[in-house]
Image: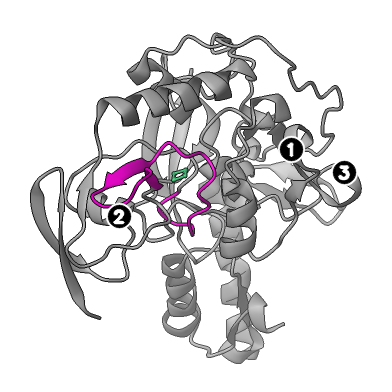
Amino acid sequence: MAMVSLTINGKKITVPDDLTILEAANRHGIAIPNLCKHPQLTPFGGCRLCVVEIKGVPRPVASCTTPVNEGMEITTVTEQLEQHRKFVLELILSDHPNDCMTCESTGSCQLQELAYTYGVKGQEYAGERRTYAKKDGNPFIERDLEKCILCGRCVKVCQEIQGVEAIDFGYRGFKSKITTAYEDDLNCEFCGQCVHVCPTGALTGKLWKRKGRYEGVKETDTVCPYCGTGCNITVHSKNNEIIRITSRPWTWNEGFLCVKGRFGYPFVSSPDRLTKPLIKRKSGEFEETTWTAALEYTASWFRKIREEHGPDALGGLSSARCTNEENYLFQKFMRAGIGTNNVDHCARL
Ligand code: FES
């Protein structure tokens, strides 16, 4: 990979030649406003907020789609560029619900943040508004198409990261919208990556609606308990209840989760959850007991079988739903504790 030298706002930088101007600027701590570009996705070039001026080029260009070149002299902030960005935001917000008071994404909405930065209140231009009466009946993802700015991030993440292609752009011009095949309800893997990358409140989780945004919400970084992959998650809790799961982009799973990790948390507060061990009696009835009694009961049967029939009369099956550490301990227990190599894993069943 070759390196190129260029200047951005008078600062001389040297970067690999496969970067775009936006990437080069970000690497050197120069922020350029943008909306449709997501760092983990290929550029779309749709919002035109990231425009910059290049010496010798007659019109501003989108920095997210323009590759760097040797000797480029780039300016990211001029009065004209700032006016252009403000105008783009005014146009977007003129056809946007602007219901920040009740929007789930308030505080984490990139559109709201840019509107704040540029002092745009919204509805600057009266005109036709998009209205979509139909609500998506899927169980996990709230799709509010009136808040969609058509940045295409959801489409790209579904294609480029998840490989599912459950959604795409439909129609043209003012009627353009993100849609499913035949405009049916979303019926995908429900990984929620689209929710993760959406820069507005167009895509949010149904499970966390009205449960809490920031006030009184505690964030705890931990590891997903669902399988041995061990994705990093952030648990949002309020009043001792889990209200939402997210993942940070700098984790090893890069902020992406599966449906279980992102939406499979309500069991924690479910009244159906078993909180005490049960022993099944000969009558077939389950009886509540203590952990000590349950473990002693189980151990006494292991001991009895081993004494009467030898350790190989026992076998253990572990699970991909356990963590690596739990699986390690399980095989150790079977080999060193029981004395048998009869240990296997549900992934091989
Ligand atoms: Fe470049 Fe949207 S971020 S066009």
What's under tag 2, amino acid-wise?
A: Ile
The residue closer to the viewer here, 329 or 306, is 329
* Quadrant of the snapshot with the C terminus: bottom right
169 horizontally vs 230: left or right: right
The residue labelled by disc 2 is 21
The residue labelled by disc 3 is 183
Label 1 secondary element: helix
The residue closer to the viewer here, 343 or 128, is 128
15 horizontally vs 200: left or right: left
229 horizontally vs 140: left or right: left
Say if the magenta span includes residue 137: no
The local crowd at label 3, few if under 14, some if 14 to 19, many if 20 or more residues have their Cα within 10 Å, is few
Q: Is residue 258 visible?
A: no
Q: CA distance from mark 2 to mark 1?
A: 28 Å
Q: Main secondary structure of the magenta part?
A: loop
Q: How is the image coloured?
A: one colour
The residue labelled by disc 1 is 173
Percent coordinates x, y for residue 241 in the rendering: 53, 25
Identified at 81% across, 39% down, the residue is 138
Q: CA distance from mark 3 to mark 1?
A: 17 Å
Say if the magenta span includes residue 56: yes
The local crowd at label 1, few if under 14, some if 14 to 19, many if 20 or more residues have their Cα within 10 Å, is few
The local crowd at label 2, few if under 14, some if 14 to 19, many if 20 or more residues have their Cα within 10 Å, is many
Percent coordinates x, y for residue 230 in the rendering: 45, 61
Q: CA distance from mark 2 to mark 3?
A: 37 Å
What's under tag 1, amino acid-wise?
A: Gly
Tell me if residue 250 comes above or below residue 133 in the rendering.
Answer: below
165 horizontally vs 257: left or right: right
Q: Earlier in the sequence, mark 3 or mark 1?
A: 1
Q: Earlier in the sequence, mark 2 or mark 3?
A: 2
